[in-house]
Amino acid sequence: MPKFSGMLKIRSNLTPNPHFMNHFHSNRIARRFLIVLALLTSFTGFSQTKLKFELSFPAAISATPLTGRMFLIITRKDSTEPRQQVGRYGTQFWGADFEKLAAGKAVTIDGSTLGYPINALNDVPKGEYFVQAVLNKYTEFKRSDGHTVWMHMDQWEGQQWTRSPGNVYSAVQKITIDPAKSETVKLEVTKVIPPISVPADTKWVKHIKIQSAKLTKFWGHPIFIGATILLPKGYEEEPTRLYPTVYQQGHFSTAPPFRFAENPNNEFYKDWTADSAPRFIAITLQHPSPYFDDSYAVNSANNGPFGDAIHEELIPEIETKFRCIREGYARLLTGGSTGGWESFALQVWYPEFYGGTWSFAPDPLDFWNVEGIDIYKDKNAFYKEYEWYKVPTTNTRIPATGEPRLTSEQRNMMELVNGTKGRSGGQLDVWSSVFGPVGADGYFKPLFDKKTGVIDPSVAAYWKEHYDLRQYLEKNWATVGPKLVGKLNIIVGRMDDFFLNFGVYKVDEFLSKTTNPAYGGSVTYGDRGGHSWRPYSNGELLKIMDAHIKKMAPAKGATTKAN
């Protein structure tokens, strides 16, 4: 204690005079009061001068009130309409829901409206912009599970509100935006997007579209599914010949399979029409749901019985109208990304209906890395949490360098601006609609909160129990394994843009160790391959499939080659 006595004395001598402190305290309170008053005055002035947009539709568009979502898009370029520049890496836009909105009444976009990539209108830099409004119409669905929901009814465009027939958009205006000024900009949507014309049938390409009784019953509204069929060379000349089929899965498109084009310079046209080419009927399916451009081709609580509709309604229709071999060994699957998951899942869940799959860069086959999110261990979808710090979760990377392109939070903000209650038509939302349970309000119960990122463990458990394909194979290999021998083939780049290679690793690890029986398939990796990496062309893939069918076919099975 003696060694510190001097210090204690000095501290005592520095004790302020109490009268001085009272005076100082009073002045400090007065200064704080003046600062707060100035701030309040400033905020009041700002609220009076904030910029806002009022978006409406005239009676000529609808004499009855509408329910849906209104969008405001701004761009710096006018090379295309603003609505056509919206996207994951696209231009700035905002969205706001409306219910039973009458003609002439406005939806307001202001500083409180969530936008993407910039969240707040007030943060848009002052400058000249091209602006446009779009009205996305919702339809009332009275589902058979007792829930009533309002969602966008696909018009055969693949759940794209920017170009969906029946949606309404405004003329483009060029204006100066200054968030600091008091201004109300009014936009009226008056132009209706016309119906989409399905390409006409040709010698090579045919189209089917049917109303599904099963899906119509579930949704309480007519639901349609369809297919684009590519016929082999010699189909008309050999009227009694039957052909194996290859189902190419993927996002919604009415284009022919394998990017076939009736152009002699098209590479696949050369492969498909060559005299020595394998003879298949190639098919792509169209099955958009109110949640996405594609249902994932399986039954789910939120989307309904799409698996049943495809296998009990659509494929029988195809096999009735076209000369397909109606045996499992002769039905093959392929697809990439979404189609990669579908082709693998259909082979696993319909092991005898199909004879083999070549699944490219499949969406997560298990869920320990869902575009960067480990749904089983992470507490938050937006960041990785360590003892003393947090790191934003990367959703998308640049394959060449590994650098982040989008964070998980950014990707989810983009979807949230596209639509609330999972109505974005986006990738993360469709996974929740397919893999997750129904929520109390009739929309899917989300895996995580779109604004905070907090993960719901109960929903993660539902995903695992119902749609984790690795867990399903591990639990059921004794019964399903014998039906899958030689049928599972996965192809993926190790630098996939969306980390989809991580959804393959543990599946590969399990399959490579299988016995009684060994799975007998293949997993092929591209060391620096991104999302679009392919080790062979579509023409080469068909030759691989041709050899597979010859190996798997019964003794008197059909031959796929002309010779």
Image (spheres, grey):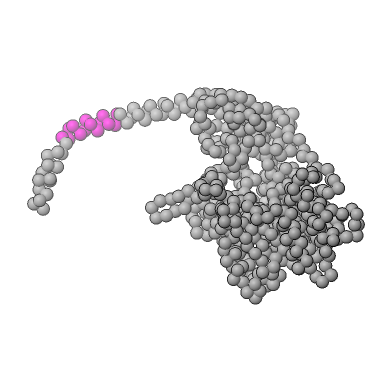
User: Residue drawn at (52%, 24%), measured in percent from left and top?
Assistant: 182
Residue lying at 68% horizontally and 42% vertically, measured from the top left:
160
For image coordinates 66% across by 32% down, the residue present is 80
| Residue 514 in the image, given as x and y percentages of width and height | 61, 71
Above or below residue 21? Residue 399 is: below
In the displayed structure image, the side of residue 359 where residue 553 appears, left or right:
right
Is residue 67 visible to us here?
no
Quarter of the image for residue 266 reads: top right
Q: Nearer the viewer, residue 150 or 484?
A: 484
In the image, residue 22 lies in the stretch drawn in magenta: yes
- The magenta segment is 17-30
The answer to whether residue 34 is magenta is no
For the C terminus, the quadrant is bottom right
Could you say which quadrant of the image residue 92 lies in? top right
540 lies left or right of 129: right
Left or right of 295 in this view: 325: right
- Residue 501 pos. (x, y %): 58, 57
In this rendering, position of residue 4 left or right of residue 428: left
In this orientation, does residue 526 appear? yes
Q: Position of residue 144 (x, y in %)?
A: 72, 54
Residue at x 50%, y 50% (from the top left corner): 393
**Front residue of this view, candidates 209 and 466:** 209
Task: Give the number of callouts.
Answer: 0
Task: Say above or below: 117 vs 226.
Answer: above
Q: Residue furthest bottom?
A: 516
Residue 4 place in picture, x, y as percent: 11, 49
What secondary structure predominates along the stretch shown in magenta? helix
